Image (tube, rainbow, N blue to C red):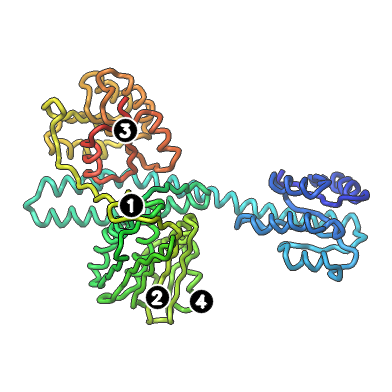
Amino acid sequence: MERRILIFAPGGRDGELTEQVLTAAQIPCHVCPSADDLAAALQAGAGGVLAVEEALGAVAFGVLEDFVNRQPPWSDLPILLLTRRGVDSPPTRQAVLRLGNLTLLERPVLRLTLVTVLQALLRARRKQYQVREAEQRKDEFLASLGHELRNPLAPIRTSAALLRHLAPTAPQLQHIGTVIERQTGHLTRLVDDLLDVARITSGKVELQYAQLSLASVIAHVDELCAEAAANRHIALAITLPPQPVLLYADGARLVQLLSNVLSNAIKFTPEGGHIALQAMVEGEILQVTVSDDGIGMEEAALERIFNMFEQNKPGGGQLKAGLGIGLSLARQFAALHGGSIAASSSGLGLGSEFTIRLPVVLPAQADGPGLAATPTAPAPAQEAGDGRRKRVLVVDDNHDAADSLSAMFATLDCEVGTAYDGYAALAAVEHDPPDLVVMDLSMPGMDGYEAARLIRQHPAAHDAVLVALSGWGQDDARRRTDSAGFDYHLVKPVAFDTILQLAQAEGAPHRH
């Protein structure tokens, strides 16, 4: 379908005769008798369009223009327009100005000329398809890379926490553990950005809207960025509206949007500089400005910095560390919320300001819904409900990940079992039913989904809390864990405290 030429020449025999010529030249083609048929055929796939000028009435022209304007970045649909008066006719002038990749041929046209021009257009179109396929392979690679990187990050993070727990009075080991955890967190954010690039370009990002307070969002952003600012002695001032503000947005994406912008400001502000984050409300619009007294930008860079993999390199200086995708993701997340983000600067050395506007504000009262205090982490509990020690089963085919996580649970005086595949997990459940199962999903033989379904069928483990650990965080993976009987789905690498809080939660959501 994508290799064919769509012929749009309703009226007379032009369409029929052109089809005969192209068929004889072994060029796939399809005659569109109406504008509606042309629109449907374009959606099904086209290598190019051949049209005659007298057929380009308002409706047909609108169909072509709409498709040209909506086509993805890799696509530049070639259009061949057959005309009798060259660019002197109004339809032809309009087509030249608004239809993009347009080629004109004056009639009468020699058959050889028509065939060779169309073959050239189709060769160029095939190059576009190759670009699309390369983009798809890149997205698949980034998704797989993110998954594979998350697997080793999990035992590294758990081992660092275990190191600090086992040596609470050794300052050097505490420092080493802190460094490992901090750098693991930084690497995790880079991996998450790579995965978001793949998800956005493939259209797989779906916002999870919920009510949340502006204060909680900004507190999370501050938590993510404050240490980086402090390490460079940058003064960070945050100003919120005096009244509580309730938002309706995807909290995770909103935090990521704002933290990406704030992290960018920290990166390009010299040591001892100043950054101000100010949030304001105008009706249902949340406006957040992030201003700094950093290196600033040239006017030409103000729009370019939002491009994927683009980095600001002012005055011929060195590139800063990073992937160059944080601001691009910020703009994408703002657009998904129906908002916008813009940058301004008075010039090099004069600082920068980013303005984010999002239509996400809901009416809120100080004691209104969604403004409850952030829950505190429960204290570690090593006992099950009947007073005995909590039984925990850790399942992962990555021995380092399983062993390090098991060691963490052992420090809490839990009875810990370790299994390295789904079959061993079922045997362990049969021998000593656990209160908590923490299980990887991607295991050879029997994966975590099937193991969870079978564990749920075991009478003694019917009410166990099942926590899935995975390098995949997409919605389809979460739906699969939900249907398999897991209570929670956590994306690697996970802080041990997060697992512990879920394990202690009263009434896991999947209890049957």
Q: Nearer the viewer, mark 4 or mark 2?
A: 2
First-in-chain label (1 vs 4):
1
Q: Nearer the viewer, mark 1 or mark 3?
A: 3
First-in-chain label (1 vs 3):
1
Under circle 1, the secondary element is helix
Q: How far apart are the alpha carbons under marks 1 and 3?
A: 27 Å
Q: Nearer the viewer, residue 10 or 358?
A: 358
In the picture, the quarter occupied by the C terminus is top left
Residue 70 vertical placement versus 156 (above, below): below
Q: Which residue is mark 2?
A: 352
Q: How far apart are the alpha carbons under marks 4 and 3?
A: 52 Å
Q: Which residue is mark 1?
A: 188
Q: What label does residue 300 carry, if any? A: 4
Residue visible at 27% across and 49% down in the picture: 372
Residue 152 vertical placement versus 235 (above, below): above
Under circle 2, the secondary element is strand
First-in-chain label (2 vs 3):
2
Which of the 4 image quarters holds residue 359?
bottom left
Which amino acid type is marked by label 4? Ala
Residue 431 vertical placement versus 274 (above, below): above
Which amino acid type is marked by label 1? Thr
Residue visible at 90% across and 64% down in the picture: 84
Of all residues, the one furthest to the left in this rendering is 169
Q: How far apart are the alpha carbons under marks 1 and 4?
A: 32 Å
Q: Nearer the viewer, residue 113 or 102?
A: 102
